[in-house]
Amino acid sequence: MVDVSGKSPSNRTARASCEVHMQPETLTRIKENGFTKGNVIEVARISGIMATKRTADIIPLCHPIRIDGVEIDSAFTDASSIKITATVKTSDRTGVEMEALMAASAAGLVVYDMCKSVDRAMKITNLQLEEKTGGKSGDFRRN
């Protein structure tokens, strides 16, 4: 594990995203809240938040850090896709890129889990860091 004890805490943010592709009928059912397990988007949001706080338990050598804020947003990008975006904030000695990636991926997995009874061909794609701010290495923004 990297020693971060000599670093000073600073404000840091990270934003990550993924896409969930499905049949148009599946997306329509999500929009209409037509799944017996509940509101797919809301359950995915809560799962993303929970996953953020457990990142250090799942990713080896990842520092457990204090999470100051998490936002999980879902957008219907076309007739058969949802883009999930996770934004995580902290004031700590190390960044929150892994926490944001964990949040987006967990939310995407929940969409799959809740909808697999009607659409096992769903795909989760394009999991990526969109941007990060703060820290010694500076800012990053995907073009």
Image (cartoon, grey):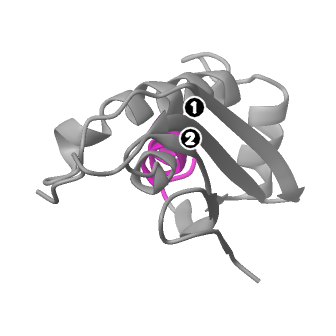
125 horizontally vs 113: left or right: right
User: Is 95 drawn above or below residue 88 in the view shown?
Assistant: below
CA–CA distance in space, label 1 to label 2: 6 Å
The majority secondary structure of the magenta stretch comes to helix
Q: Residue furthest bottom?
A: 143
Magenta residue span: 101-120
- Can I make out residue 17 in this image? no
**What x and y, as percent, mark residue 67?**
47, 28
The answer to if 54 sits in the magenta stretch is no
On the image, numbered disc 2 is attached to which residue?
A: 111
Number of the label disc, if any, that sits on residue 44 = 1
Q: Amino acid at mark 2?
A: Val
Residue 143 located left or right of residue 35: right
Please report the residue visible at 82 percent of the width from the left and 47 percent of the height from the top. Answer: 75
x and y percentages locating residue 36 in the rendered image: 59, 16
Q: For the residue labelled by badge 2, is the local secondary structure a helix, a strand or a loop?
A: helix
> In percent of the image, x 44 and y 52: which residue is there?
95
**In the picture, residue 17 is in which quadrant?**
bottom right
Mark 1 lies on a secondary structure that is helix
Pair 1/2: label in front: 1
Q: Nearer the viewer, residue 142 or 139?
A: 139
Instruction: Between residue 21 and residue 139, name the one nearer to us.
Output: 139
* Residue type, numbered disc 1: Ala
- Asked if the stretch drawn in magenta spans residue 107, the answer is yes
